[in-house]
Image (cartoon, helix red, strand yellow):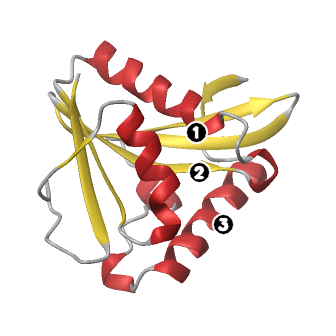
C-alpha cells in the first residue's frame, strides 16, 4: 500500500469522501455528525492522505492541526472493497507517525458511540487511545465518543 498527500481533486477520492459523509449522516443526527466535507478538508489546517493499492484507492485519512501541540484525526475511511485488509491500521499508524514528526504532544478524535463504530473504537484502543472528555469545540453528546493519546 502506498500513501500520498491528496489534493482532493480526483474523482475517486471525492467519491470516497461523499460515501463517508453519507454514511456518517445515515448513522447520526445532523448535530452529531462531525465529518468534514470537501471544503472542510481543503482548509490549510488539514492534511489528507489517500491510500492506494495496485492503482486502486483503498482508503483515506486526514490530520487536522488544532494547535502546534495537538492534532485531530478526521475522515478515516476504508473503501468497501478493501475492508478488513489492514488499510485503517496502516492509515492510523501513518497519522501517529506524522503527529510525532510535527511535534504534537497529543492526538485526539471523535467517533460514533453506536455499535457500528465499535471496530473503529477497537482499532483506536489497540494503538493506545483512551476515552476522554470532549476537546476543542466538541460538547458532550450521547452519539459521540472522544478518544486521545499522548505522542
Q: Which residue is mark 1?
A: 88
Q: Is residue 79 visible?
A: yes
Instruction: Tell which of 27 and 127 is nearer to you.
Output: 127
Q: Secondary structure at mark 2?
A: strand
Mark 2 or mark 1: name the one nearer the start of the chain: 2
Distance between mark 2 and mark 1 Cα atoms? 7 Å
Q: Residue at x 48, y 51 (%)?
A: 120
Q: Count neighbours of disc 1 (C-alpha within 10 A) and say few if under 14, some if 14 to 19, many if 20 or more.
A: many
Q: Is residue 42 visible?
A: no
- Quarter of the view holding residue 146: bottom left
Residue 8 point in image, percent of width and height: 61, 46
Asked if the residue at tag 1 contacts the one at tag 2, i.e. Cβ–Cβ closer than 8 Å, the answer is: no
* Residue position marked by numbered label 3 in the rendering: 19
- In the image: residue 54, left or right of residue 59: right
Q: Compared with residue 122, is residue 99 higher up or lower down, i.e. above or below?
A: above
Mark found first going from the N terminus, 2 or 3: 3
Kind of element beneath mark 3 = helix
Question: Which label was assigned to residue 27?
Answer: none
Residue 12 position within the rendered picture, expressed as x and y whole percent measured from the top left:
77, 51
Placement of 110 over or under 72, stated as above or below? below
Q: Residues within 10 Å of mark 3 (few under 14, many from 20)?
A: some
What residue is pinned by disc 2? 77
**Cα gap from disc 2 to disc 3, whole angstroms:** 9 Å
- Choose mark 2 or mark 1, whichever is in front: 1
Is mark 2 in CB contact (under 8 Å) with mark 3? yes
Give whichever of 62, 145 is nearer the camera.
145
Amino acid at each position: 500500500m502506498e500513501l500520498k498527500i491528496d489534493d482532493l481533486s480526483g474523482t475517486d477520492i471525492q467519491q470516497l469522501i461523499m460515501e463517508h459523509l453519507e454514511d456518517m449522516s445515515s448513522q447520526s443526527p445532523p448535530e452529531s455528525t462531525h465529518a468534514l466535507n470537501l471544503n472542510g478538508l481543503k482548509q490549510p489546517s488539514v492534511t489528507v492522505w489517500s491510500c492506494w493499492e495496485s492503482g486502486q484507492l483503498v482508503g483515506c485519512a486526514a490530520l487536522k492541526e488544532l494547535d502546534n501541540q495537538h492534532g485531530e484525526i478526521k475522515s478515516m475511511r476504508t473503501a468497501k472493497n478493501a475492508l478488513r485488509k489492514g488499510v485503517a491500521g496502516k492509515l492510523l499508524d501513518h497519522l501517529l507517525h506524522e503527529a510525532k514528526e510535527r511535534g504534537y504532544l497529543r492526538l485526539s478524535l471523535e467517533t460514533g458511540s453506536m455499535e457500528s463504530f465499535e471496530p473503529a473504537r477497537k482499532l483506536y484502543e489497540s494503538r493506545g487511545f483512551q476515552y476522554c472528555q470532549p476537546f476543542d469545540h466538541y460538547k458532550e453528546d450521547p452519539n459521540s465518543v472522544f478518544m486521545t493519546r499522548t505522542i
